[in-house]
Image: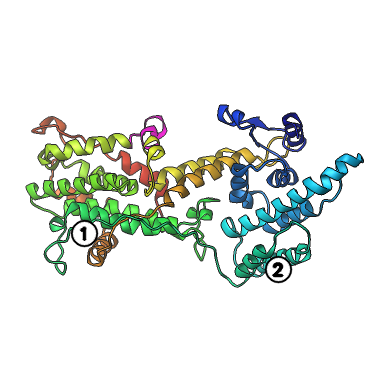
Amino acid sequence: MAQQDTIERIDSGCHDTTDGGADDHSRNVEMIKAGTLATLVENLTRHDRLDAAFNRAFLTTYTYFTSGSELLGHLIDRFDNTQPPSTDSTEIEQWSTQTKPLIRLRVVNILRQWLEHFWSEPKGHDTDELLRTMRAFVQRVASEPETPTQQLDIIIQRRLSGQTYTKKSHPSISNPPKPILPRKLDKLQFMKIDAKEIARQLTILEAQTFSNIQREEFLHKNWQKKTTPLVAPNVRCLIRHSNQISNWVCGAVLAEPDLKKRAQVVDHLVNVASTCHQLQNYSAVISILSGLESAPIYRLARTWAMVTERSCNMLRPLQAMIVSAQNYQAYRETLRVAVPPCIPFLGLFLKDLTFIEDGNPALTSDGLINFHKYTMLATTVQEVQRWKEAPYCLQPVPELQEYLAKQLHSAVELHEMWDRSCELEPKGRGLSNRPRDLYTPTGGMSASMVVACMVLDD
């Protein structure tokens, strides 16, 4: 089919079709911006071109604009559509021998992808009925030529039995670095644990939760909902973990009454943050900076005056990475060039998803599904998901992880630490009186990212 015919066919139901840029021009790919559900399903199962990006976006976000039963109905109708496009004998022959078999194969493949990778239907009677309807369809068409349905039938049976498909991450081929252990694992003290090993164990803890996050947890702003059971348990767990790190950092500094030792705690925490940065655990980096730049710590002028020059020099690039200029361009660029494994800070992604959901209508002025909105949502979700493609090659130390988990869970909220900060340094911040000005905290810039994007009120 000619390119012009393709555009006209899409325009008949998706008349907001636009080109996707120079790269897409070179591949003859158009970006679907809007359309009816029937035409979107038609594009999902085209015989003449496989648009993998469109298919991922559709299957990632279909719950926004249709139900599972309605989608299945459209796919079955698409499979059963045996009406040739014309009465010309040559075109009828081409339809029967080439076009129709390819469409049917596409429908079967889309059903398989849906079930294996994009299934978002809640457990319950209605979903079981949907699966039984799907299986009845598969059994009905099993004898059709060039329609491989055996694997699809197996997947449906697995879904009916409650089994889920889990993508296995590729094991690392390298050996993990040997843990740096303190002399007494039974009597752990923060300052006697190597900063590099603290960063490693924090990364292992966060990576476990991050790898468990399911795609649907990012959709429909599920992390904000307090349903029972929770619909985004792993996102909420990572949010809580990030906030606990910030609280723990603040509490660790304020727990030391001696000025010199308090500055040494800051030095130690900076080393932890620097190693997290090297591990590409940007979630922990931002959480640690959030604690160091919180109001109770920011005001400790005498403490900051005693922080070593080395620590101050290490802090500057970390602070520069998360500066808010141009919508956090520096941080976004850091993520863009990073190679997994990596743990991104979720706050910015949740902010992006919220902006896309709230700032774009579900339907266009013509009453079509605003698929451009769902493409943006899917692209953002897929960007987060790709960081899970490779696991960290680090060795867990149960004693250290238990110690850190206990410290994080017992940390008090930041707003409860102000009085303690005033007790340690009654005069508070006075920049003009500081002996030296090696490093100036931002006074809560990164903390505002956490609070604005990730705060939980339960």
Check disc 1 and report the residue beneath it. Answer: 179
Task: State whether residue 126 appears in this view.
Answer: yes
Which amino acid is tagged 2? Arg
Task: State whether residue 290 appears in this view.
Answer: no
Applied colour scheme: rainbow
Vertical side of 378 occupied by 108: above or below: below
Using the rendered view, name the quadrant where residue 122 is placed.
Answer: bottom right
Main SS class of the magenta portion in the image: helix
Question: Of label 2 and label 1, which has the lower sequence position?
Answer: 2
Left or right for 447, reference 428: right
In the image, which residues are magenta? Answer: 322-332
Instruction: Report x, y in % for residue 165.
Output: 54, 63
In this view, the residue in front, 294 or 308, is 308
In this view, the residue in front, 401 or 231, is 401
Check disc 2 and report the residue beneath it. Answer: 132
Indicate the secondary structure of the residue bearing disc 2: helix
Vertical side of 349 occupied by 151: above or below: below
